[in-house]
């Protein structure tokens, strides 16, 4: 079985694959202060609790938190005693990073692009609704670039941090566009405004490419956004990054 881990700015998503089937997932809060031993014990206990510990033979990880890349890799190697593929821009993924500086492309975006290329119609745009909201454009077997915007959490925190009168906001779905109080006003601006941004940017991407794209959405805020779009996502995949890690691992294993 394959252990995969996507190390993000807010959380670490861990999964176990039995061949091509995702059979279990966990989510861990990202903490750069945790030691290799702490992460190792956490993963060891998760797997032991699900009676999966003795079945893990390989691991693959992606990380956008550089201090944790080696920490988690070493934790898996030392506590689970399996080889680990740590994804980078130079890993063989089957796709070309057709951008000015490939090493600047986040590993999660590389994994997402690989999953989109292998699993969905092309050209495709992946919308990852996490700490940041990213748009990744895939044309044939190439990642051709994308867009990075503040995510819902960043937007909400910015409103309260940079103004004196606006309260801290717990992100939720707004009932109406025109809010009747401050919280409703903020929710409409953050959530519905984000949906309108997505609609507008997808339209702009299609105009620039001169053709329709397949839209694939993933990320922790997916369910908050999807009901407010004028154009629904063609596909939703909460674990798209894990799928990409599985495909990349299998490619390199061969």
Image: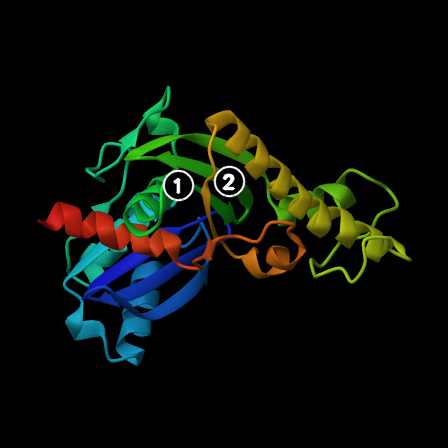
Res 111 quadrant in image: top left
Quadrant for the N terminus in the image: bottom left
User: Residue 79's quadrant in the figure?
Assistant: bottom left
Rendered position, 203 above or below 186: above
Eyeballing the image, is 209 above or below 223? above
What residue is shown at x 19% (from left), y 55% (from top)? 77
With 209 as the anchor, is 94 left or right in this view? left
Identity of the residue drawn at 25% across and 61% down: 3
Mark drawn on residue 109 = 1
Q: Nearer the viewer, residue 54 or 211?
A: 211
Query: How many numbered dots are placed on residues in this image?
Result: 2
Tell me residue 116's x, y (percent).
Answer: 35, 47
**Mark 1 neighbour class, 10 Å CA radius: few under 14, some 14 to 19, many 20 or more:** many
Q: Is residue 85 above or below residue 50?
A: above
Of pointers 1 and 2, the one earlier in the residue sequence: 1
Answer yes or no: is residue 121 visible. Answer: yes
Q: What residue sits 34% from the left and 40% below the top? A: 110
Q: Is residue 160 left or right of residue 62?
A: right
Residue 108 picture location, percent across and down:
38, 44
Furthest residue to the top? 100
Residue 252 image position (x, y, % from top left): 14, 45
Taking depth in this image into account, of 193 and 36 the one nearest to the observer is 193
Which SS class for mark 2?
strand
How far, Cα to Cα, is label 1 from label 2?
Answer: 8 Å
Residues tagged 1 and 2 counted as in contact (Cβ below 8 A): yes
Q: Name the residue at 29% across, 79% down.
A: 50
Relative to 136, is 161 on the left or the right? right
Residue that label 2 marks: 134
Query: Mark 1 falls on what kind of element?
Result: helix
């Amino acid at each position: 079985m394959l252990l995969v881990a996507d190390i993000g700015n807010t959380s670490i998503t861990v999964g176990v694959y039995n061949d091509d089937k995702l059979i279990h997932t966990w989510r861990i809060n990202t903490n750069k202060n945790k030691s290799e031993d702490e992460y190792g014990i956490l993963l060891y206990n998760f797997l032991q609790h699900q009676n999966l510990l003795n079945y893990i033979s390989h691991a693959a990880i992606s990380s956008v938190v550089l201090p944790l890349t080696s920490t988690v890799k070493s934790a898996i190697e030392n506590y689970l005693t399996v080889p680990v593929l740590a994804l980078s821009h130079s890993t063989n993924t089957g796709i070309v990073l057709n951008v000015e500086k490939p090493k600047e492309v986040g590993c999660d975006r590389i994994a997402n692009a690989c999953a989109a290329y292998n699993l969905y119609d092309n050209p495709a745009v992946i919308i990852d609704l996490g700490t940041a909201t990213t748009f990744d454009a895939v044309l044939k077997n190439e990642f051709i670039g994308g867009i990075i915007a503040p995510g819902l959490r960043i937007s909400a925190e910015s409103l309260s941090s940079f103004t004196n009168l606006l309260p801290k906001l717990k992100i939720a779905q707004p009932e109406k566009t025109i809010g009747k109080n401050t919280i409703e006003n903020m929710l409409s601006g953050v959530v519905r405004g984000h949906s309108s941004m997505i609609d507008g940017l997808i339209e702009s991407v299609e105009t620039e490419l001169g053709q329709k794209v397949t839209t694939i959405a993933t990320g922790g805020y997916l369910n908050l956004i999807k009901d407010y779009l004028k154009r629904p996502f063609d596909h939703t995949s909460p674990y798209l990054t894990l799928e990409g890690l599985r495909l990349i691992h299998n490619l390199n294993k061969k």
